[in-house]
Amino acid sequence: MNTASNLRPVSAVASARSSDDRQQLSDLIGLIYDAAIDPSLWEGAIERSAYFVGGTAAGLICKDVGARHAAMPHNFGFQGPPVALFEPIYPTAEPLFLGDIEQPIAITDLIPFEELTQTEIYRQWAQPQGFVDFISAVLDRTTISAAIFGVFRHERNGIVDDRARRQMRLIAPHIRRAVLIGRMFEFKAAEVATFVDTLNGLSTGMYLVDAEGRLIHANAAGSAILAASDILGSVGGRLVARDTQIQRTLRDIFAAAGQGDAALGIKGIAVPLIGKNGERYVAHALPLTSGARRRAGIVHVAAAALFVRRAALVASSTSQVIGETFKLTPTELRVLLAIVEIGGIPEVATAFGVADTTVRSHVNRLFEKTGVTRQADLVKLVAGYTTPLAG
């Protein structure tokens, strides 16, 4: 028998594996977005995300700046370590919460594994569970708190490698979008069937649009924003941003959302909107083309929901003080605040509709004027001008 004729070409095997990987990622992204409107799905989404990254446990972890303990609203496969064990390594682990938005960082990037094994948290907590490393990405960060998604690597998974970092980069933006949108409202299981009714009661502005940006529905808060005709308007039945660069970004977001969950990618996770009087808003887009979102009573022609909230991180008077102190141009101040509110250079560039190199140039000038050398230090700088009661 000619066994060679029964063998698939290597290229065909690789192609099939690649197709399976893409489908696995697409299915996972869909589950993550479903969790944004149905929190009961978070544990399953986190479990599958842990395996996707190459770990055995994972969780969403929230921590106030300076606090040596954290809250875990959703997790799978572990219980948090006692505060007494975490406190001694807090100074070493703090960069996990101060890193660039969505960029993977491992605990072994911060402390060599040999040193880690000598700590009490490893001996008493991690080793008994077989954990040898932890990889995480910042999902949200303000001047007073941060939220991360992290995956624990078991000894059978090994220390965090390039593949784990690549997988984390693929899913972190989607987890971030789901977390940010989920914070705007909380659903009970029974409410999922009345999705639109629930959205109508939000204080956050909400719009349902099709893939071409046609406005299908606006809640009361969203209608008030349109009536003000400042940051957003309705032109020819389409939702339109007053800023032309932001309009191009929104147009791309809506078109991508119409092609499915994975097509949206990292677009529209946090889009800044600035009014004529300097008031700042942030918009978040959620695709609606599949999963529980499609079954939740939403008008079926809607491709995306756009949520618009006031950005209350830094009061305008505080922003002015920062600008005057460091002699920042209006554009440099806008980039500084975007780094804090939105994330790293690529995402700010996407939100502003400009090249990465343009934003990088502004960030370099911010480094020169403020005397810091890292984006995380820019966040700390802004925090120094903001009290916990600001906004």
Image (spheres, rainbow, N blue to C red):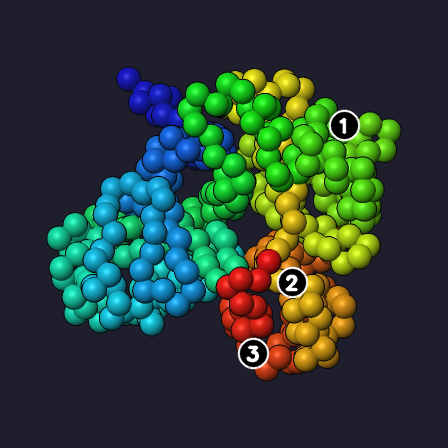
Residue 262, how many percent across, how many down? 55, 35
Question: Please, what is the three-letter code of the amino acid marked with disc 2?
Answer: Ala
Residue 142, how many percent across, how many down? 52, 59
* Residue at which label 3 appears: 372
Q: In the rendered image of this protein, does residue 103 appear above or below residue 377?
A: above
Residue 305, how many percent across, how many down? 63, 32
* Residue at which label 1 appears: 214
Q: Residues within 10 Å of mark 2 (few under 14, many from 20)?
A: some
Q: Give me the disc on residue 225.
A: none
* Callout in the foreground (2, 1): 2
Q: In the rendered image of this protein, does residue 186 appear above or below residue 275?
A: above
Q: Earlier in the sequence, mark 2 or mark 1?
A: 1
Q: Quadrant of residue 343?
A: bottom right
The residue sitting at 80% across, 57% down in the picture is 277
Q: Earlier in the sequence, mark 2 or mark 3?
A: 2
- How far, Cα to Cα, is label 2 from label 1? 33 Å
SS type, badge 1: loop
- How far, Cα to Cα, is label 1 from label 3? 44 Å
The residue sitting at 63% across, 53% down in the picture is 311
* Residue at which label 2 appears: 315
Q: Can you see residue 286?
A: yes
